[in-house]
Amino acid sequence: MLPHRSRRRRSEEPPMSSSERVAALRAEMDKADIDYYLVPSSDAHQSEYVPGAWQRRAWLSGFTGSMGDCVVGRDGAWQWADSRYWLQAEAELDGGAWTLMRQGAEGVPKLVDWLGSLPPSSAVGCDPRLLSAGQAERMNRALAGVGGALVEIEANLVDRVWVEQPPLPDAPATAWPDALAGRSVPDKLGDLRAAMSAKGAAALVLTSLDAIAWAFNVRGADVDFNPVVIAYGLVTAEGATLFVAPGKLDAAARDNLAGAGVAVADYDAFGAALAACRGKVWVDDDHASLWVVGRLEAAGCEVMARMSPVMLAKAIKNPVEQDGMRAAHVRDAVAVCRFLHWLEAAWRGGDLDELGASDQLERFRAEGDRFVGLSFDTISGFGANGAIVHYRATPATAKRVDDSTLYLLDSGGQYLDGTTDITRTVHLGASTAEQREHYTRVLRGHLALRHTRFPRGTTGTHLDAFARAPLWEVGLNYGHGTGHGVGCYLSVHQGPHRVSPRPSAIGLEPGMVLSNEPGLYFAGRYGIRIENLCLVVSADVGGDTPFYGLEDLTVVPYCRKLIEPALLSARERAWVDAYHAQVRQALAGRLPGDVAAWLEAQTAPLR
């Protein structure tokens, strides 16, 4: 069921402080007779980005990063954040109420390990909708070591105290046309049923919002930057049902689903549908919540928890999606090039700040065909703010953009035929030798990953070191993954593949889209990141084993004045020149005259 209807605080009452929110939650914990309460960053669909109504963790702790869970106890409150968010969390958390747990730092336990160190017989409350079944199993295993346990509380305790909680979004959802999707709903459901049959599954439960959007060719606006609709899905051999709020689907979506034989039911009817399931039911091991699995087990079902067949199907783009992604990136590049050209003059007025710059880039994007909106909140970081990996400018933090140091801009767009994500770091004045060396080493790692050839079965874990090696040569590194999967007019962060030191069993396959974004960050000074999106393609290298490589989808020049040619090998210089030739060709005839002249200068061969 939808867990709340919004209550509004009287306008004359000031917002609760962080310590007041924690105190109010502790009062609810006392009523529930629990020692700790777990507040994950995710929602009932295990989403990374969640609707405002479900941003409970951010409301409670004040930390607004997209990832990081928190726990409130009777005598303390703890917020976990990985290295991408340490600086941001330090700035946002009330140090008097919260302890920042710098995940990954020496001596700082992961949340699940921390649970295993709690006092004996600790009762840790949780909303079973907000934990995956796998997470809950690991947590219960850790707590069992101290005689403790998770306590499932269906009425979310944060909702009880969040009196100004906004309502759930009511934006309509529509059909994504087959001409853009490349495959119809009946075709997709046919493939899912074949996968189910091969595993002996009577039903497939879909809980991930982007998986549902992909399988049913629907797109919505329920989550900022992600064209998804809040819904559940259920596929059986005989039929399929989409569970969504009444009136959510427009006529095109209803007609498309009806033509595919998909029934539509109320979102709140999903629990009863789970209770009616029988036999072996397939759920995704990363996204099915403790609540979903509990309903199925109570119905006597055999729950098969493994990666959903949707995950790889949506990750491997079909030819129509690939062409759409290429076209979207060309239109996006026009906007970004117009912006970079504009920026070189706009900063001289003295009143351009990080917010003004990112707003102008969005305006350029909005002038392009098929633009729907941004694909994430733009990271517009000048100087020291660029060293905050997931920085978000606000009126209070926005720095003026000038020619004194580096400016990092990580942005992207949602287009009807594709999703983009690009980072460029620029200097509007005279760069230092140190800055050029840092930038060029990041560029070398970016180029090394782009031009790597690898055999079938290679995972992103195998490739990650290629992007880091030029930094490792001089004792430098970065604390985030090198690449993430990207959807096609879907979520900008999409699994199951990635390029990261974290172990992955998912081999990269032709049709997958991933980011290539090594970086380097110096707290209090500046950050550097260079990011292109790439398509995995077949590579003809001879031999009997299939080999793959990467094709650049992003077609925007690197920052020429930050490249130190002397630090590049002849092969690396040739790679840069070839990429810039590709950029010129892709954008030929698409730019205004002054921008075209700027592009010609930016992409001239290195000397």
Image (cartoon, helix red, strand yellow):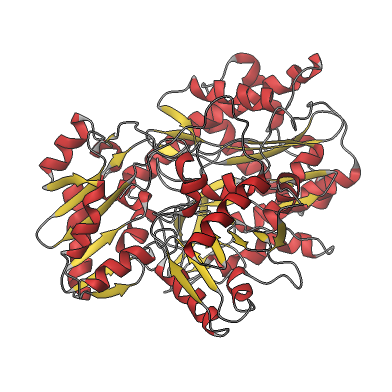
Farthest residue toward the right?
Answer: 433
| Residue 179 in sight in this render | yes
Would residue 183 be seen by someone viewing this image from the given angle? no
Query: Where does the image place residue 241, in percent across and percent down from the top left?
Result: 18, 51
Out of 449 and 90, give the one closest to the viewer.
Answer: 90
- Quadrant for residue 558, please give it: top right
Q: Quadrant of the C terminus?
A: top right
Q: Is residue 54 left or right of residue 344?
A: left
Q: Residue at x 24, y 39 (%)?
A: 178
Where in the figure is residue 495, as x and y percent of width and height? 45, 58
Locate residue 355 relative to residue 541 in the image: left or right: right
**In front of the other: 490 or 80:** 80
Residue 228, placed above or below residue 428? below
* Number of on-image labels: 0
- Residue 191 placement: quadrant: bottom left
Residue 394 location in percent, x, y?
A: 68, 31
606 or 295, which is in the foreground? Answer: 295
Residue at the location (26% across, 40% down)? 245
Q: Is residue 274 left or right of residue 289?
A: left
Between 5 and 492, the one lying in front of the other is 5
Query: Residue sitting at 62 percent across and 52 percent down?
Result: 22
